[in-house]
Amino acid sequence: EADIYQTPRYLVIGTGKKITLECSQTMGHDKMYWYQQDPGMELHLIHYSYGVNSTEKGDLSSESTVSRIRTEHFPLTLESARPSHTSQYLCASSEYRGSEAFFGQGTRLTVV
Amino acid sequence: AQTVTQSQPEMSVQEAETVTLSCTYDTSESDYYLFWYKQPPSRQMILVIRQEAYKQQNATENRFSVNFQKAAKSFSLKISDSQLGDAAMYFCALLQGAQKLVFGQGTRLTINP
């Protein structure tokens, strides 16, 4: 079982609220990723990180922001949640280029 | 433009039979990596098999094998002796550049007992 954790697993929140989705890994991996996935559908890369203090935007434009102050922690923040943000968010990490990516269990976000 | 394309939204196979899932990709790089990941219902995504582009030999992992056609940019997954536990969404993925990992649309595989 991979040592990568996402909290919360489920979140229902009102429009306009600020939320932070947590992702932590204990494997010491430098590379971390955030994906957005609608049910039964493809994963869209929204952010990734090479290591501490390095973040990049992915292919899918997202209103979310990320930070990487510590190797093990890669939180994603939405300043003002909207119903269009309703989705599943998956966090992943990998050790080096080409190595297996380990995924968390995901956070299912519903904005009402 | 879609970088990784899986043209089969759904596939089904009889238990113990063989099934092949298709994937094509687009990249201008010569050194890259390809993966197949499995996402069982309500469970974590896990790696099925991995292929390094510079290796001509097709990767195999027990009942899972790939047909890697570099010139055609094709990377299909063959599952032999299908089992009920193989039922899942299967995603093809391409690692571009230093670490940009992008996925295809997914194929939902159903195993018929």
Image (cartoon, rainbow, N blue to C red):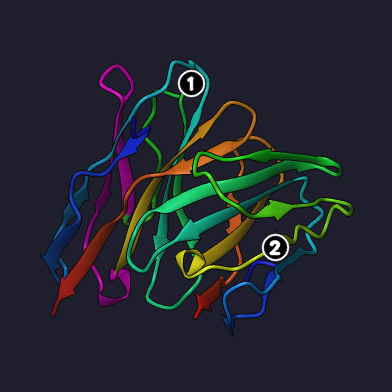
Marks 1/2 same chain: no
Vertical placement of residue B14 versus B52, above or below? below
Q: Nearer the viewer, residue A92 or A109?
A: A109
Residue plotted at (82% across, 50% down):
A68
Q: Position of residue A79 (x, y in %)?
A: 70, 62
Q: Is residue B13 left or right of residue B25?
A: left
Kindly indicate whether the residue at mark 2 contacts the one at mark 1 (C-beta within 8 angstroms): no
Quarter of the rendering occupied by the C terminus of chain B: bottom left
Q: Which residues are magenta?
A: B64-87
Q: Amino acid at mark 1?
A: Tyr
Which mark, residue B18? none
Residue under label 2, please give it.
Answer: A79
Residue density around tag 2, few if under 14, some if 14–19, many if 20 or more, within 10 Å: some
Circle 1 marks a residue in which chain? B
Q: CA distance from mark 1 to mark 2?
A: 43 Å
Q: Secondary structure at mark 1?
A: loop
Q: Is residue B93 left or right of residue A52?
A: left
Q: Secondary structure at mark 2?
A: loop
Q: Position of residue B99 (x, y in %)?
A: 62, 35
Vertical placement of residue B103 versus B109, above or below? above
Residue plotted at (27% across, 39% down):
B23
Residue under label 1, please give it.
Answer: B54
